[in-house]
Image (tube, rainbow, N blue to C red):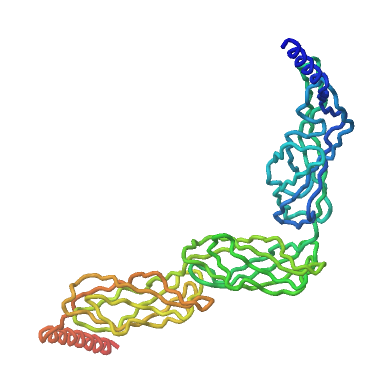
Amino acid sequence: MKYSRVLIIFFALVLCCSMPAMGVNTYLGGTPQMSAAIAGTNEFSPGQDAIISIIVQNRGLNVDKFVMEGTIDRDDIPTTAKMVTVSLSSGTAPIIVKTDPQNIGDMKSQATATVRIETTITTNATVGEYQIPLIVRYTYLSSSSQPASDTLQSTYRQVNETIPVTIKIKPQVKIEVVEAVPENLSVGTGGYLNLKLKNIGFEDGKKATVKILRNGNSPVIPTDSSVYIGDFPRNGTVTCRYKVAISDNAEPQTYPVDIAVTYENREGDVVTSATDTVGIPVQGKNSFRIVSDPVTLSPGSENTIAIQYQNTGDTIAYHAQARLSAVDPFTSADNNAYLGDLKPGDNATAHFRISADSSAPLRDYALDTEVRYRDALDNSQVSDTFKVNVKVAPPLQSLGFLGVLSLVLIVAVIGIGAGYYLLVMRKKK
């Protein structure tokens, strides 16, 4: 039994001595080497909202690798870029960067990552190439040491690296609104918008079409949205005319309209220019008023009354018609009258046949009236309701026999007096 125990212990010691020694991989030298390039197109147009996709790569290589016994395994490799943050700056380029710095994490050797950065090319950007700085921030393991068998000391270094990337601003038609003249644009009606445009860009547009577009919830709504103008050369000017409608909920003020040009560029591609916005003044809704004296009727009478209307609005009311609403104690078999075309400030008289009930109380009344007319686009419009003043008064009383006799006597006395005066004057001569 004693010999067997000794043999077991002996074989266990031999087995332990025959096990291979464990080693640790250690990398010496090498650092992260960051590079960047734009993925996809790097050509953009003035005024364009552009997403710039950039590929970031760690091209660092591990120089030497050792397998060392009796060392502690390192957590990081010198060529690993840790906590990488990428941001784009506009520099001197005509762009506006909208995306904040992006954290893309750790990047090992040969790893890549793509970041998408939202930008806007300024509308006044000139044609050419621009270098924009891409700022890459990261840390890496610069050195490590093992002062004791159970201790590992690591030193990290922080790096701020700027990598230039190139973008190109390509020529484009750029519009400038030289003139914007509205015609008969008032609240709730339709009219025309006359535009004069100039191409101040660096591109000659071919087969061009000028479009006007509604700006958000603007109450100016294009009815005709496109006008074909053909060639639109650099520094050339064109005039366009559009039908537009103004919604009922508008106020008398200036509202925006967007304008863009679709054309064929020098490469034969159909493109659309950046939009330009112009303010369009909108006048108040057409209004009318009564400028004649109040109408007087007597109970039980029927008369033709004359009412004078005035256009107090800012646009022409075409083919205007007045309507009078006769309510108790009045009736009317003819409550519509034609006024014709009324320019701002014009007057027109309407005639209505109206009756007053014999039991009508003696007092003042206000009857509703309105004017229906056509706007510049031949759309039917109706004014707001306003009032016509009507007075019910007693009829003039007859003079009777005594009254007539008195009137005859007065006239006779006046006649006799005049004759006597003439007679006396002749005798004196």
Q: Residue furthest right?
A: 64
Location of residue 197 with respect to 71 vertically, above or below: below
Q: Quadrant of the C terminus?
A: bottom left
Q: Find residue 217 and report its horizontal and vertical position in percent.
A: 54, 60
Q: Find residue 422 and report its horizontal and vertical position in percent.
A: 26, 88
Judge left or right: residue 347 versus residue 109: left
Location of residue 252 with respect to 161 vertically, above or below: below
Taking depth in this image into account, of 386 and 167 the one nearest to the observer is 167
Q: Residue at x 42, y 73 (%)?
A: 382
Q: Quadrant of residue 3?
A: top right
Taking depth in this image into account, of 251 and 259 the one nearest to the observer is 259
Q: Find residue 235 and report its horizontal and vertical position in percent.
A: 78, 65
Q: Quadrant of the N terminus?
A: top right
* Numbered circles on residues, count: 0
Judge left or right: residue 277 versus residue 74: left
Location of residue 96 with respect to 178 vertically, above or below: above
Q: Find residue 310 and report its horizontal and vertical position in percent.
A: 42, 73
Taking depth in this image into account, of 369 and 43 the one nearest to the observer is 43
Judge left or right: residue 326 versus residue 240: left
Q: Residue at x 45, y 72 (%)?
A: 311
Taking depth in this image into account, of 288 and 403 the one nearest to the observer is 288
Q: Residue at x 40, y 69 (%)?
A: 384
